[in-house]
Image (cartoon, rainbow, N blue to C red):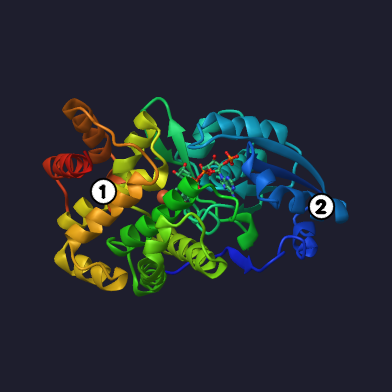
């Protein structure tokens, strides 16, 4: 059994401004990686720039990361930051994941960049500091990065495993999230926790974090219908996201994530919502003991009530979608080819099982 969590988490109000000494030890020049607006809106970019200036650390800003980032953004960022000593990712999972890919290419050069990110040879990276502004991916404590791959028309994980050296967590950076992003990301965290628990790689160590994340979600789940969250509730959800990240860092994710990726690719569904569509079906195909424990931790009466809850939550974020049978077959072919993900399941699933899950979930969703 192994538990490995090298990322140092510092959670506090104003933590970035208090951490000049930490930034300083990583070098003289940083590449800041962000999305187009959220790092500015949340106040995190201003804090980072001022702490870097105060400590005479130079920086470049790559602020072009889009949602569900395409692989090529790693190349673009690394070209800008080629003379940087470390990378600071600020934002949701999209900029944080891209910060990790860019950090590999800054260290090893941008030629043959896809091979460096996805090929068989392992490459390390310059240090990454993560400053999350969404409460979902846990990317601040996971070694994973997920990118959109237009060749296979879905999303795919980088082969390199890059843990951030530090994660700075300040609740104020999350408070500017729009309602839909907030709900989608909180549900992403919940799905991480259940996919980590219902997992062949789950251990008593990863379970502690998965259970706590599921329990927090269960306690506050009805708050998601409110536009505003109390600060303490928000803090709990942010912690649940980091806890769930610490759980998947050990186990990886499995079916809801992999089934949701082509829906995000083809219908632009927000990541957490795409996962949520499959929660009920995932529990149905999983051994009964998992369902019992998850109902106990969340406080849902039964699986049907849980399914109904997720349909209501999804309706706060997106319109319904309709998927053709031939597309379901294609998504299922892609999934069955992903042996690494299938290995995370505690039980085997067949092609027909997965088609049945797609149909069941999408039918209930109509
Ligand atoms: P995201 O794609 O990073 O951001 C979604 C939207 O929210 C963007 O428009 C972003 O604006 C905005 N936003 C973020 N924080 C905000 C804030 N505080 N205030 C206002 N707006 C804010 O969302 P995400 O759900 O966190 O990340 C999803 C990505 O992470 C997917 O690609 C998913 O596959 C990946 N993921 C990674 C892991 C992992 O372990 N690494 C796990 C699960 C999912 P900007 O565009 O301006 O930033
Ligand atoms: Fe996720």
Closest to the observer: 233 or 339?
A: 233
Quarter occupied by the N terminus: bottom left
Q: Give coordinates of residue 8: x percent, y percent.
A: 61, 66
Secondary structure beneath dot 1 equals loop
Marks 1 and 2, how far apart at CA: 43 Å
Q: Give coordinates of residue 360: x percent, y percent.
A: 16, 44
Closest to the observer: 5 or 217?
A: 217
Give yes or no for contact between labels 1 and 2 (Cβ–Cβ under 8 Å).
no
Q: Respond yes or no on whether mark 2 lies under 8 Å from ligand 1.
A: no
Q: Which mark is residue 278?
A: 1
Q: Tell me the quarter of the picture where residue 207 sits.
A: bottom left
140 is higher (above) or lower (below) than 97 = below
Q: Tell me the quarter of the picture where residue 166 sits.
A: bottom right
244 is higher (above) or lower (below) than 99 = below
Residue wearing tag 2: 50
Secondary structure beneath dot 2 equals helix
Left or right: 157 in relation to 277: right
Left or right: 339 in relation to 100: left
Identify which residue is drawn at 57% across, 66% down.
Answer: 231
Task: State which tag comes first along the sequence, 1 or 2.
Answer: 2
**Badge 2 density bin: few <14, some 14–19, many ≥20, Cα 10 Å:** some
Left or right: 57 in relation to 126: right
Q: Give coordinates of residue 150: x percent, y percent.
A: 42, 26
């Amino acid at each position: 059994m192994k538990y490995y969590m090298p990322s140092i988490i510092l959670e506090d109000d104003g933590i970035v401004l208090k951490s000049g000494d930490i930034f300083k030890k990583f070098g003289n020049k940083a590449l800041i990686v962000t999305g187009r607006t959220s790092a500015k809106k949340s106040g995190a970019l201003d804090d980072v720039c001022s702490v870097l200036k105060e400590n005479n650390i130079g920086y470049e800003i790559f602020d072009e990361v889009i949602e569900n980032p395409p692989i090529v953004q790693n190349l673009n960022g690394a070209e800008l930051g080629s003379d940087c000593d470390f990378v600071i990712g600020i934002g949701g999972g999209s900029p944080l994941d891209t910060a990790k890919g860019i950090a590999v290419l800054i260290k090893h050069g941008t030629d043959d960049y896809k091979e460096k990110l996805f090929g068989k040879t392992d490459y390390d990276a310059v240090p990454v500091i993560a400053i999350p502004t969404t409460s979902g991916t846990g990317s601040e404590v996971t070694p994973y990065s997920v990118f959109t791959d237009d060749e296979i028309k879905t999303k795919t994980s980088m082969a390199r495993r890059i843990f951030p050296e530090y994660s700075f967590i300040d609740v104020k950076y999350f408070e500017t999230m729009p309602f839909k992003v907030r709900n989608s990301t909180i549900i992403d965290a919940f799905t991480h926790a259940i996919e980590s628990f219902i997992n062949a790689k789950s251990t008593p160590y990863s379970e502690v974090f998965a259970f706590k994340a599921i329990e927090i979600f269960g306690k506050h789940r009805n708050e998601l219908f409110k536009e505003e969250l109390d600060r303490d509730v928000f803090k709990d959800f942010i912690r649940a996201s980091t806890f769930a990240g610490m759980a998947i860092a050990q186990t990886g994710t499995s079916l809801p994530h992999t089934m949701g990726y082509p829906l995000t690719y083809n219908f632009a569904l927000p990541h957490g919502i795409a996962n949520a569509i499959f929660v009920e079906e995932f529990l149905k195909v999983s051994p009964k003991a998992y369902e019992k424990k998850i109902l106990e931790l969340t406080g849902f009466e039964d699986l049907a009530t849980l399914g109904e809850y997720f349909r209501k939550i999804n309706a706060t974020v997106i319109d319904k979608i309709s998927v053709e049978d031939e597309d379901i077959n294609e998504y299922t072919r892609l999934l069955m080819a992903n042996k690494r993900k299938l290995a995370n399941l505690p039980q085997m699933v067949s092609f027909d099982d997965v088609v049945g899950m797609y149909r069941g979930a999408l039918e209930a969703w109509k």
